[in-house]
Structure formats: C-alpha cells, structure tokens
Amino acid sequence: MNEVLEFLRNCWTYYLATVEWDQPRVRPFGTINVFEGKLYIQTWKSKNVSRQIQSNPKVEISWFFDGRWIRVSWELVRDDRVEAKKSMLDRYPELRGMYDENDDNTEVLYFKNATATIYSFTEAPKVIDL
C-alpha cells in the first residue's frame, strides 16, 4: 500500500472512473489519505459522483508519473464516522473552507478489495493487492 500511496501523492491529481447507467464518467480527484490502515478518498454526498458510487461501488482510478502509470480497481465503501472525515480534512486543511467533518455532506470512502497495477513502457506490469 505504501508504494501505491507514494505514487499517488507524487502525482497530485488522479482520475476516478465511475459508471452512470451505461455511461462511463471520469473526473479529476486530488485527495488521498490513510486512516486505520485503509486508503480513503473524499467528496460531497450531493455530487453526482457520490450517487454513482452508491449505485455501483466498483470504480477505478488511474494516474501517470515519471514514465509509469497506475490503475487501481476496487469497491468504495462510505465511512460516515467523524473521525475518518476529520483525518482526511486534517491531511488537506485547505479544504476546510468547503468541507467540515461535522456536516452531513462531507463524504469519505475507503478502498475495499483493491488491486493496483503499475505499468511502464520498459517493465512488466506489477500487481499489488491492497
């Protein structure tokens, strides 16, 4: 997990793919955090991405850095605990102007059944179970 987390934090922006009915949806994300040994991302419950995840929790992210790229496939699980939200916002204090761990709109989700694959143009793919 540390290799995947380091890769993701070096990239700053990654792309999250969800499904809405039969249409793929991809958008940039930037938050990633480890809380209680699990990888978490963050959004608002009022966004379309949240509704898409709740409808179909199987998602993928992808990002590129330094000649390598990574794809992580997993299911996302909502964690409504204030402690999990606070941990995310403590990691990204600049988001506190829009998000608060005590509101009912801030949402954090953790990776379940995740597999990461790191690719490059010069090496065989490396698969990591998270």
Image (cartoon, rainbow, N blue to C red):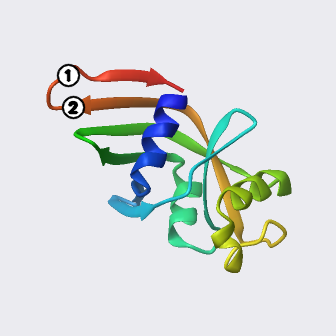
Query: Where the N terminus falls, by quadrant?
Result: top right
Give the residue drawn at x 64%, y 62%. Answer: 92
The image quarter containing residue 23 is bottom left
The residue tagged with tag 2: helix, strand or loop? strand
Residue 116 percent across, percent down from the top left: 42, 31
Picture mark count: 2
Mark 2 and mark 1: Cα distance apart in space: 6 Å
Q: Is residue 27 above or below residue 3?
A: below
Residue 128 percent across, percent down from the top left: 44, 23
Task: Residue lying at the far left in this picture: please name it.
Answer: 121
Give the residue drawn at x 15%, y 26%. Answer: 122
Numbered tag placed on residue 120 in the rendering: 2
Q: Nearer the viewer, residue 55 or 73?
A: 73
Q: Are marks 2 and 1 in contact (CB under 8 Å)?
A: yes
Q: Nearer the viewer, residue 111 or 50?
A: 111
Residue 32 percent across, percent down from the top left: 57, 50
Q: Is residue 108 above or below residue 74?
A: below
Drawn side of residue 33 relative to residue 18, left or right = right
Drawn side of residue 93 relative to residue 16, left or right = right
Give the residue drawn at x 48%, y 30%. Answer: 3
Give the residue drawn at x 31%, y 45%. Answer: 65
Numbered tag placed on residue 49 in the rendering: none
Mark 1 lies on residue = 123
Is residue 15 visible in the rendered structure shown here? yes
Q: Amino acid at mark 1?
A: Glu
